[in-house]
């Protein structure tokens, strides 16, 4: 058997080496000239439930961004030109995308985890934030904004427009806690309180009512059933909502009890 390499094989090997070298050059150039970095998934960092912006030093900021169905918190951030921003991203419900248009930052917002990336905004302008990971029926309308302006000494967050409605002072504490979680955990995106059917069944009057499932069985919606639906949402699928894939949420036993009491109160 001859040890000589055929001419066609030499061409294939040469092309493979050139293509590999070109890829390495592109990666090196992106890292050196365009600041390309690999996003970090931070271990041991507890996910947060509210967005925030803090200033560390001159033009150095830390932004905590929360994704939920179907918005970003904070929805708008205003920063000065030259701001160097450490961005930490988490999700309250399902996996969302987090891409700042006009930059090289593209992160995944994952429930129970925190991802990190850094961006330097060298030019004034509006930088839209978009979700580029399909996350449900209103995915197309999930966006935020980072505005970079000149003559600004410090960054700030505009006042929130959507606040949790105030409740009566005599409302039981567990119900109030559950009402807050209804907004924070993204339940509001799929379950109405007024009887209207959106993505999932309405919470209005659900407690004590018969629920019918796709396997032909039914059960009275008591506390045990509501708890099970929160912790194991795919165990019993309500008839008429076969195509809805409700995710499991990271909740504590105290939070589950609060949600149960709130749902019981929605008459």
Image (tube, rainbow, N blue to C red):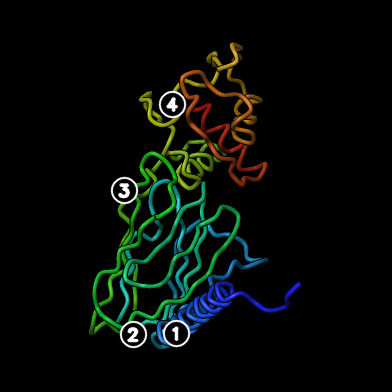
Residue farthest front in this picture: 1
Decide if residue 35 is on the left or right side of residue 256.
left
Instruction: Give the answer, above or below, for where 131 lies relative to 156.
Output: above
Q: Disc 1 or disc 3, which is closer to the eye?
A: 1
Residue position for label 3: 141
Where is mark 2, residue-wise? 82
On screen, residue 186 above or below 111: above
Front residue (pair 189, 11): 11
| Image location of residue 15, percent across then percent down | 51, 76
For the N terminus, which image quadrant? bottom right
Q: What is the C-alpha distance between the residues marked 1 and 3?
A: 35 Å
Disc 1 or 4, which lies upstream in sequence?
1
> Going from the N terminus, do you reach mark 2 or mark 1 first?
1
The reply to whether the C-beta atoms of the residues labelled 2 and 1 are less than 8 Å apart is no
Where disc 4 sits, the SS reads: loop
Please say if the residues under marks 1 and 4 sit with CB atoms less than 8 Å apart.
Answer: no
Task: Give the residue at mark 4.
Answer: 202
Q: Earlier in the sequence, mark 2 or mark 3?
A: 2
Indicate which disc, 1 or 3, sits on the residue closer to the N terminus.
1
Residue at 58 percent across and 32 percent down: it is 260
Question: Which class describes the residues within 10 Å of circle 1: few (<14), some (14-19), or many (20+)?
Answer: few
Q: Residue at x 62, y 38 (%)?
A: 256
């Amino acid at each position: 058997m001859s040890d000589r390499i055929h001419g066609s094989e030499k061409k294939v090997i040469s092309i493979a080496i050139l293509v590999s070298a070109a890829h390495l050059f592109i990666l090196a150039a992106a890292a050196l000239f365009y600041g390309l970095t690999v996003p970090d998934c931070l271990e041991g960092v507890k996910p947060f439930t509210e967005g925030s912006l803090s200033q560390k030093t001159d033009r150095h900021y830390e932004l905590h961004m929360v994704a939920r169905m179907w918005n970003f918190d904070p929805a708008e951030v205003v920063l000065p030109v030259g701001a160097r921003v450490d961005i930490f991203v988490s999700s309250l419900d399902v996996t969302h995308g987090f891409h700042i248009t006009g930059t090289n930052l593209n992160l995944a917002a994952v429930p129970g985890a925190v991802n990190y990336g850094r961006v330097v905004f060298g030019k004034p302008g509006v930088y839209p934030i978009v979700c580029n990971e399909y996350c449900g029926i209103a995915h197309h309308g999930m966006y935020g904004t980072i505005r970079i302006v000149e003559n600004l000494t410090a960054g700030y967050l505009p006042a929130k427009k959507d606040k949790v409605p105030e409740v009566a002072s005599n409302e039981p504490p567990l119900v109030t806690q559950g009402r807050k979680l209804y907004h924070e955990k993204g339940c509001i995106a799929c379950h109405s309180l007024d009887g209207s059917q959106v993505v999932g069944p309405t919470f209005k009057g659900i407690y004590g009512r018969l629920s019918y499932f796709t396997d032909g069985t039914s059960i009275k919606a008591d506390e045990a059933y509501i708890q099970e639906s929160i912790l194991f949402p795919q165990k019993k699928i309500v008839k008429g909502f076969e195509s809805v894939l409700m995710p499991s949420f990271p909740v504590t036993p105290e939070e589950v009890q609060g949600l149960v009491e709130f749902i019981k109160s929605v008459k």
